[in-house]
Image (cartoon, coloured by chain):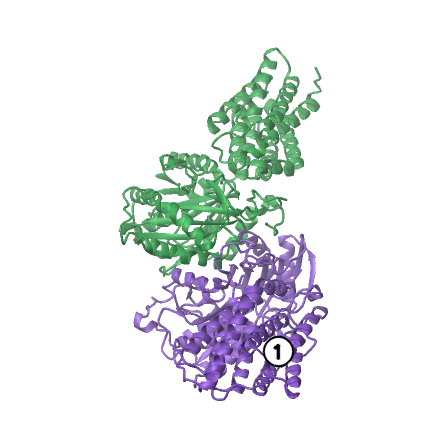
Chain colours: A purple, B green
C-alpha cells in the first residue's frame, strides 16, 4: 500500500517536484509535466509521451537523451489533460514536428487527441502512435483496442532513437508504427496497489491465485490460475507470446528479439531474475537471439504485485534503435554524447500565460457572482463527499474519482474567483472554470466537466443576463457535448444516466414557464433518482473495468457526483433568488 | 511476499544465473558470485564487495566499470562463505591488491576475514573496510559495531572510483575509510519481506505504525511511532542525520553532501519523490549543497516496505569520486569509456579445481564408510526438518536456518560420497564434507559446521581406525573451535548450549570405558535435553535479532538442529555396530 503522502490531492504534483529536484540534470518542470533539460538537435522530431502518474519510470523517468523529449504527467492513474499534453508538447517542440505516443486508454486518447488538434491548428506537424502491446486485452483482430503496458518502452525508444538519428516526422512515425506492430506483451497479477489515502486496494486477487492477462490498473484479464513456480510462469508468458507472432515474422532461427521482463512494483529483482533464467532458456530453445534484455521495473503500478513479459521482434533498423544509447533518470544504456545543459534563459515554460479578462456587461457580471457562488457550493459538496466518491469508484473503477473531482473543483473555484475579481461576465467565468477543471483534474471526468462547463458558457454569453431558457439550452448543449465526447448511452452506468433525465426535466419544466430555480430543483431531483438507479446496472461494456459484477448495488461514481453537484447548485439558486414556487 | 521461485534452496543460484544471463555485457559468473566481464586496468586495485542475496542491486548489481570489480553473493540473507569470497577475489584480482568491503554483519565479518587471511597467505595485498553507516544500530562511541545499510554504495563507489583513478591499495583503503566515516544513514520500516517458500514475514510492524531505525533484516531499531506524513518522515530522517555530523564537518553553508533516498522494496518511486521534495528543501534550508542525489532502490530487502536516507559528507576528493561515471547492471551514471569485453579465453573461473584424493588406510576407509552413512543420516534428518528449522529460526532470527542447513548438508553429502568413492580415509572425507558445507551453506551456521567437521577430521586421521577416545577428542576440538570462532557461552541461546553438554557427556562416558555407540547415545540425549531448554532462554546479546522476547518458548534453531544431527548419528552408530550396552 502507499503510505507516504501529504495531501492525496497534491500527491502527483509533489511527486513531480521531487522527481525534478532529484534529476534536474536530465529533466525540467514545465506546465503539465517535464521536458529534457539538455539541448536537443534543432529541427529534430520531439517525441512526447505521457499518461497517468503511478507507473514510474513511466512516464517522466523516460525523458532524456536518446529517449523522450517530454512527458505529460497526469494525476494518479488519470490521463493528463489536453492542456497538459499541449503544454508539454509545445515546450518540447524542436521545430521538426511532434510525435505523441502513449498507452491506449480511453482517457488518454481523448486528451492527447484534443491536444493534437490544437497543435495542428497552430501549424505543428503532430502525429500519434498509441501503444497496443497487451495481447490479453483484445484479440489480434481488434489489436487497435489493445491496451499499452510495458511495451510502451520499445515504441518510445525506437521513435526517439529514430529522431536522434535525424529521421523526419514521416519516418519517425513509420518506425513507431512498426515498433508497435512488432511489440507484444502479456502480464499477470497477484495483488493490486492501494492509492495514497485509500483504505483498500484497487483490486484484489485471491491469495495463492494469479490473474493472467490482468491490466496494470486491474483491468480484467483472461483467466485465473494458481500461482505457478517461477519456471511455470516463464513457460506461460513465453508460450502466450510465441503463439502470436507479428505479421511477417517467421520464428526462424536467429530471429532477434528485444526482451523486457517487467516487475510491476513488489515482485522484486531476485524473483525476476529467477524467472528470467527460464525465459532466456526458452527463447534460446525457440531459436531466437535475445538482444539487450531488460529485467527490472520499467512500467509499474505503485506496489502492485505483478510481472509482464514483452517481446520486441527486431529488424536491422529496430535493432539499431533498441541498442542505441539513452540517458534518462530511470533508463540508461551505453554512452550518450556529453549532454549540453540548457541555459536558465532557455528554460522558460513556453505556455504559462496569465489569462486576460475582458469585463462582461453589468448584467452578466451580476450573473457571474451567482455562478461563482454555485461553483463554491459545488466545491463544498465535492470536498465533503470526496472520500465517498473514491470509495464508490473503487468498487468497479480505478478509485480516482474523488481525488479527480476534488482537484478539478478546487481549480475551477480558484479560476472563477480570479475571473470574477477581474470583472468577468458569466461566460468568461465559466470558461475559466471549465479550462481549469479539465486541466487540473485530468482523466475522463475532468475532460467531461470541462466540456460541460464550456458548452453552458457558450449559451449564456457575457452580455445578457442568463435566463431559464438560455441556461436550459446550455445544459442541453453540455449533454450533447459529453455524449458525443464519451459515446455513452443511458443504461451504461455512467454520468450520462443522470445528465439525460436532468436535461430533459429542466427543459420540460422551463417549457411550462417555470422559473430557473424551481425548474432546476425538480431536474436535480430527477438526477438524484436516476443516479440512485445506476446501482442496479452493470457498467458499460468496454470501459475496461475489473470485476464489473461487483459493482451491482453501488451507484456509478460519475452519476452520483453529478447529482450531488446539481443539488448543491439548486440550494444556491434558491438562496440567491428566494424563489419558492 | 516472495511468490516466484522453484526450489527455495536453489533460489540464490538460479537468481545469479538469471542475473548474469540478463547482464552479460557487464558481469560474468564465477564460483561464489560475479566479476566484471569487461577488462580492468592491469595492476589496479580490485574492489570486491558482497553479502547475502535478497538486497538487489546489492551486491551483484553493483559490479561493473566505475564500481565494484566483483561481488561474492551469498544465499538469501546469509553471508557468502569464505570460499566464495576467496574465489571471487581471486577472479577479480588485477594484480594491484584487493579491497574487501561489505556491510558490518557478524557472518560477513567471519567469512570475509577468513578469506582475507587466505588471500594474504598467498601473497595478495588484501585490505578490508566494513561499512558502518546505520546510526540507529549503535551509538557513535561504538561506531565500529554499527551495521551497513544503503551507505554501502557511497563507500563502494568512492573506493572503486579511486581505483579507476589509479590509486594504490594504500590510497584506495584510505579513501574507503574516509568515505565510511563520512557516511551516515537511518532507516524506517513498515513491514518485512517474506522469503521464498516461507509462510510468514521475517518480521512485522503493527498496521499504521513505523519502526524507526529498524535494520534491513528486521534488526531492532530505536522506537516505534505512528506512520507520519511524507513531510513528517523527511523531517525525522533529516533531523536524525543532521544531529550527528561526522568529525571535522561543520554544518557550514555550502557544505556538499551526496544523498541517497533508498526504497527497501515496496515503498515505490512516487512516494520516494514526494518525500525527497521535502528532504531537498530541508537540506537547502540547512545551507547544504546536494550533489548527485540518488532516489530509488539501491539496497533492498526483497519487498520490505521501508525507506532509508543516507548523507555522504563530501570533500573535493570524495565529490570527484561520487560524481565519477559508472556502468553496472543497476547503477549507471555519466559516460564511461567504451568497455572492452573480455575474451572467452580470459573468462575462466580461476579457482574451480577438482579435489585430488589420497587414499586412506583400509581401517580408515572402513571408518569412512560409517562416516558417510552418518552424513547421509544427517542429510535425511535435515531434509525432514528443514521447514521446522526455518520456522523456529524466523521467530527470533532471519529464518534462513532451514535452507542454510539443507544446502550445507546436501553439499557435504555429495562431497563425502565423492571422497568415499575415491577411497578417502575418514579425515579426508570429513574435510571434503566440511569445506563443501561451509561453502554452499554460507552464513554463520555454515561456517560453524565447517569448523566442527574439520576439527573432528583432524583428530581421527586417515590412518588408524577411529576410537571412542579419538572421536571424543575430535568433538571436544570442534567445541573449542566454534566457541573461539563464535564467542558464545552456554546460556546465550545458541548452538553452544547443546554442544557443551554433548561434549562433556561424551567425554565423561568414554572416560568410564563405554563404547562409542553407547557414549554417543547418552551424549545425544543430553544435547536434546539442553536444546529443549533453550526455549526458556533469551537470545544472546549482540546477535542483533529482532523481537528477542518473542523467542521465549521457542528453542534455538542452531541448538535444535545440532541435537537432531547427533541423534541421527546415534542411530547410524547403533545400526552399524549393533552395540546396545
| Subunit of label 1 | A
Q: Quadrant of the C terminus of chain B?
A: top right
Tell which of A410 and B483 is nearer to you: A410
Q: Which residue is mark 1?
A: A580
Q: Is residue B256 left or right of residue A571?
A: left
10 Å neighbourhood of mark 1: few (<14), some, or many (≥20)? few
Q: Residue A175, how many percent across, how many down? A: 50, 76
Q: A568 above or below B544?
A: below
Q: Which of the 4 image quadrants contains residue B436? A: top right
Q: Is residue A203 left or right of residue B276?
A: right
* Res A540 seen here: no
Q: Residue B576, how many percent across, how many down? A: 69, 23
Q: Residue A87, how many percent across, how many down? A: 43, 76
Tell which of A159 and A473 is nearer to you: A473
Q: B156 above or below A174?
A: above
Local SS, label 1 = loop
Amino acid at each position: 500500500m502507499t503510505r507516504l503522502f501529504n495531501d492525496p490531492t497534491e500527491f502527483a504534483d509533489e511527486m513531480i517536484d521531487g522527481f525534478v529536484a532529484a534529476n534536474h540534470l536530465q529533466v525540467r518542470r514545465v506546465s503539465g509535466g517535464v521536458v529534457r533539460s539538455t539541448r536537443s538537435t534543432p529541427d529534430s522530431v520531439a517525441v512526447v509521451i505521457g499518461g497517468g502518474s503511478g507507473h514510474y519510470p513511466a512516464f517522466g523517468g523516460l525523458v532524456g537523451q536518446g529517449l523522450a523529449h517530454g512527458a505529460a504527467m497526469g494525476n494518479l492513474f488519470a490521463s493528463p489533460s489536453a492542456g497538459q499534453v499541449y503544454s508539454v508538447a509545445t515546450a518540447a517542440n524542436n521545430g521538426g514536428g511532434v510525435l505523441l505516443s502513449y498507452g491506449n486508454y480511453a482517457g488518454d486518447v481523448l486528451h492527447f487527441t484534443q491536444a493534437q488538434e490544437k497543435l495542428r491548428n497552430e501549424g505543428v506537424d503532430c502525429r500519434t502512435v498509441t501503444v497496443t502491446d497487451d495481447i490479453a486485452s483484445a484479440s489480434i483482430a481488434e489489436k487497435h483496442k489493445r491496451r499499452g503496458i510495458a511495451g510502451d518502452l520499445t515504441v518510445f525508444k525506437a521513435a526517439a532513437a529514430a529522431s536522434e538519428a535525424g529521421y523526419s516526422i514521416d519516418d519517425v512515425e513509420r518506425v513507431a508504427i512498426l515498433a508497435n506492430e512488432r511489440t507484444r506483451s502479456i502480464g499477470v497479477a497477484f495483488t493490486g496497489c492501494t492509492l495514497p489515502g485509500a483504505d483498500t486496494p484497487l483490486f484484489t486477487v485471491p491469495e495463492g491465485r494469479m490473474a493472467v492477462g490482468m491490466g496494470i490498473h486491474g483491468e480484467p484479464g483472461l483467466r485465473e490460475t494458481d500461482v505457478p513456480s517461477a519456471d511455470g510462469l516463464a513457460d506461460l508468458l513465453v508460450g502466450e507470446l510465441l503463439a502470436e507472432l507479428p505479421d511477417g515474422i517467421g520464428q526462424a532461427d536467429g530471429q532477434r528479439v528485444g526482451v523486457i521482463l517487467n516487475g510491476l512494483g513488489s515482485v522484486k529483482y531476485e524473483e525476476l531474475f529467477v524467472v528470467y533464467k527460464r525465459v532466456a532458456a526458452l527463447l534460446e530453445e525457440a531459436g531466437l537471439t535475445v538482444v539487450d534484455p531488460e529485467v527490472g521495473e520499467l512500467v509499474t503500478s505503485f506496489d502492485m504485485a505483478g510481472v509482464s513479459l514483452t517481446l520486441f521482434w527486431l529488424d536491422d533498423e529496430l535493432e539499431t534503435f533498441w541498442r542505441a544509447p539513452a540517458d534518462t533518470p530511470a533508463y540508461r544504456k551505453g554512452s550518450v554524447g556529453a549532454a549540453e545543459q540548457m541555459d536558465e534563459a532557455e528554460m522558460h515554460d513556453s505556455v504559462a500565460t496569465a489569462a486576460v479578462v475582458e469585463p462582461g456587461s453589468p448584467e452578466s457580471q451580476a450573473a457571474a457572482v451567482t455562478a461563482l457562488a454555485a461553483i463554491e457550493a459545488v466545491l463544498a459538496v465535492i470536498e465533503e463527499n470526496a472520500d465517498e466518491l473514491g470509495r464508490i469508484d473503487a468498487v468497479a473503477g480505478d478509485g480516482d474519482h474523488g481525488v479527480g473531482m476534488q482537484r478539478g473543483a478546487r481549480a475551477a473555484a480558484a479560476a472563477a474567483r480570479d475571473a470574477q475579481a477581474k470583472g468577468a461576465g458569466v461566460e468568461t467565468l465559466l470558461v475559466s472554470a471549465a479550462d481549469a477543471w479539465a486541466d487540473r483534474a485530468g482523466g475522463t471526468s475532468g475532460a467531461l466537466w470541462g466540456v460541460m462547463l464550456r458548452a453552458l458558457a457558450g449559451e449564456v454569453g457575457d452580455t445578457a443576463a442568463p435566463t431559464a431558457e438560455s441556461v436550459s439550452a446550455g445544459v442541453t448543449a453540455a449533454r450533447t457535448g459529453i455524449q458525443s465526447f464519451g459515446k455513452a448511452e443511458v443504461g451504461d452506468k455512467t454520468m450520462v444516466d443522470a445528465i439525460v433525465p436532468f436535461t430533459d426535466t429542466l427543459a420540460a419544466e422551463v417549457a411550462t414557464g417555470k422559473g430557473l430555480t424551481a425548474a432546476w430543483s425538480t431536474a436535480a431531483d430527477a438526477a438524484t433518482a436516476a443516479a440512485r438507479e445506476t446501482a442496479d446496472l452493470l457498467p458499460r461494456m468496454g470501459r475496461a473495468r475489473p470485476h464489473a459484477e461487483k459493482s451491482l448495488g453501488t451507484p456509478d461514481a460519475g452519476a452520483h457526483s453529478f447529482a450531488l453537484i446539481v443539488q448543491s447548485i439548486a440550494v444556491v439558486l434558491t438562496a440567491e433568488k428566494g424563489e419558492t414556487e
